[in-house]
Amino acid sequence: MTTTDDLYRGPVKRSIQIAGHLTSVSLEPLFWDLLKAAAEARALPLNALVAQIDVERIAADDPPNLASAIRLWLVRDLVDYVSPPAGGRGG
């Protein structure tokens, strides 16, 4: 997981293949760690989870950029984990 030194580091750019093409995504190390953990929890490759997030993003009325969509998705995922809807998972 992210160390205290990494917590306030700036974004790290990585290439991810989505729908057959490479795209660059810049996220802070904490978000990369959370994204990797979310993909592992779902038994998905990182690219597959990002592709799912991208589909949700594109369907929005006013879609944010991909990096913002990933951050927002991760926050929602954490909120759902901490306060799950009835019958959901929880921590």
Image: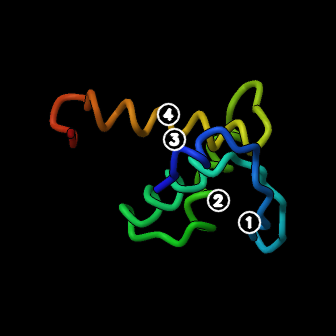
Numbered label attached to residue 51: 2
Q: What residue does disc 3 label?
A: 74
N-terminal of the pair, mark 1 or mark 3, is 1
Label 3 with label 2: CB-CB less than 8 Å: no
Q: Point out the tag, 2 or 1, that comes first from the N-terminus.
A: 1
Residue under the image location 63 percent in, 44 percent down: 70
Could you tell whether 90 is left or right of 34 in the image? left
Quick check: marks 3 and 4 in contact, CB under 8 Å?
yes
Q: Residues within 10 Å of mark 4 (few under 14, many from 20)?
A: some
Q: Give SS at disc 1.
A: strand
Quadrant position of residue 56: top right
Type of the residue with mark 3 = Leu
User: Dot 1: few (<14), some (14–19), or many (≥20) neighbours within 10 Å?
Assistant: some
Q: Residues within 10 Å of mark 3 (few under 14, many from 20)?
A: some
Picture residue at 34% right of the left edge, 33% below the top: 80
Q: In this view, does 83 lie to the left or right of 78?
A: left
- In which image quadrant can residue 47 be found? bottom right
For the residue pair 72 and 6, the one nearer the viewer reads as: 6
What amino acid does circle 4 point to? Val
Determine which residue is flagged by label 1.
Answer: 18
Q: Where is residue 33 in the image (x, y as percent from the top left)?
A: 53, 56
Mark 3 vs mark 2: which is more N-terminal?
Answer: 2
Q: Which of marks 1 and 4 is nearer the N terminus?
A: 1
For badge 1, the amino acid type reads Ile
Residue furthest out toward the front: 5
Q: Report helix, strand or loop for mark 3.
A: helix
Tag 2: amino acid: Ala
Residue identifier under label 4: 75
Whole-angstrom CA distance, mark 2 to mark 1, is: 6 Å
Q: Residue at x 83, y 69 (%)?
A: 22
